[in-house]
Image (cartoon, rainbow, N blue to C red):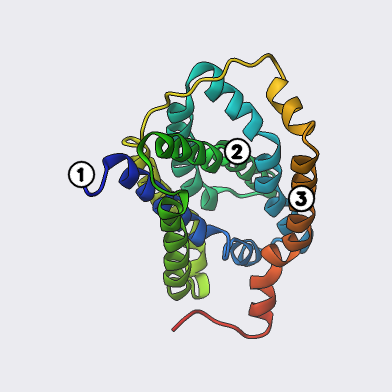
Amino acid sequence: MQLWPVGAWSLRLYYFWYFAAAGIYFPYVSLYYHEIHLDGAQIGLLASLAPLAGVLLPPLWGLLSDRLGWRKRILITSVLTAAIVAPLVPLLGSFTLLLAIIVLLAVVLSPAVPLADATTLEWLRGNGGTFGNIRVFGSIGYLGSSLLVGILFSGRHILWLFPLYGAVLFGACLATLTVPGQHDRAHLSSGEGIRSILRDRRVTIFLALVILGYTSFAAYNTFFALYLKELGAGPVR
C-alpha cells in the first residue's frame, strides 16, 4: 500500500504551485500598477477582472467538463496559457494593451480553481481522505511565496512580478500533467444544472451573502498594499 498516493500528491503540488503564484500576484499587483503610474480608477478596473471572470465563466467550464470530459485538458491549457502570457506584461506600452492582457489572464485562469476542486473531490470519493488535507498545501504555498517575494520586491524589483508569476504558474502546469483524469460525466439538458441550483433557496442565499461579502472586501484586497506603502511600510527584511 502506497503511503503517499500519486493522485493525492499531484493535487497537493498543483495547489501549492498555483497558490504560490497567487501569493506573488495578489498582495503585490496593486504596487506594480502604482509603480507604472496607473491611477486608482485604472487599478480598480484591472483588479475587478479576475473576480468578474470567476463569477461568469466557471459554469461554462463546468459544462464543457461535464459533457465532454475535458476537465484535465482545460486545467492544463488554463495554467500553461497563463504561464506563457504573464511574462509579456512588462513589454506592453499602453493601458489598453495592459487591459487586454489582464482580461486574457482573467479568462484563462477562471477554471483553474473550480476544476481543480472538482478533480480533488472526485478523487477523494474513490480513494478516501479529506479535502482539507490536500487543499492546505495551497495555503502553505500562498503564505510562503507572499513572504519571500516581500523580501524581493523592493524598489524597482516589483517590475519582476509578472515574469515571476508566470514562472511559478509553470510549476502548477507541470503538476497538472499527473493529476487524476476525469471519470464523472453529467448529461444534463441545457441550463438544467444552473436552474436546479437557483431553485434551492439556501444556495441562493449563500451565494448572495458570498457576493456581498466579497464586494465589501474588494477595496481592502485591492488598495491595502498601497495604503501601507503610504504609511511608510517597506519590504520585509
Residue at left 72%, top 50%?
A: 48
Residue at left 75%, top 47%?
A: 206
Nearer to the camera, 159 or 31: 31
Q: Whole-percent x and y of residue 228?
A: 65, 79
- Which residue, given by chain and number where applicable, does mark 3 sit on? 211
Vertical placement of residue 138 versus 230, above or below: above
In the rendered view, does 155 fall on the left or right side of 11? Answer: right
Q: Which numbered tag is attached to residue 157?
A: none
Rounded to the nearest whole Å, what is the CA distance between mark 1 and mark 2? 40 Å
Three-letter residue code for mark 2:
Leu
Quarter the N terminus occupies: top left
Question: How many numbered markers are drawn?
Answer: 3
Quarter the C terminus occupies: bottom left
In the rendered view, does 176 fall on the left or right side of 57? Answer: left
Is disc 3 placed on a helix, strand or loop? Answer: helix
Three-letter residue code for mark 3:
Ile
Pointer 1 local density, CA inside 10 Å: few below 14, some 14–19, many at least 20: few
- Which residue, given by chain and number where applicable, does mark 2 sit on? 104
Residue at left 61%, top 50%?
A: 93
Vertical placement of residue 53 versus 20, above or below: above
Pointer 2 local density, CA inside 10 Å: few below 14, some 14–19, many at least 20: some
Pointer 3 local density, CA inside 10 Å: few below 14, some 14–19, many at least 20: few
Task: Answer whether labels 3 and 2 touch (C-beta < 8 Å).
Answer: no
Is disc 1 placed on a helix, strand or loop? Answer: loop
- Which residue, given by chain and number where applicable, does mark 1 sit on? 2
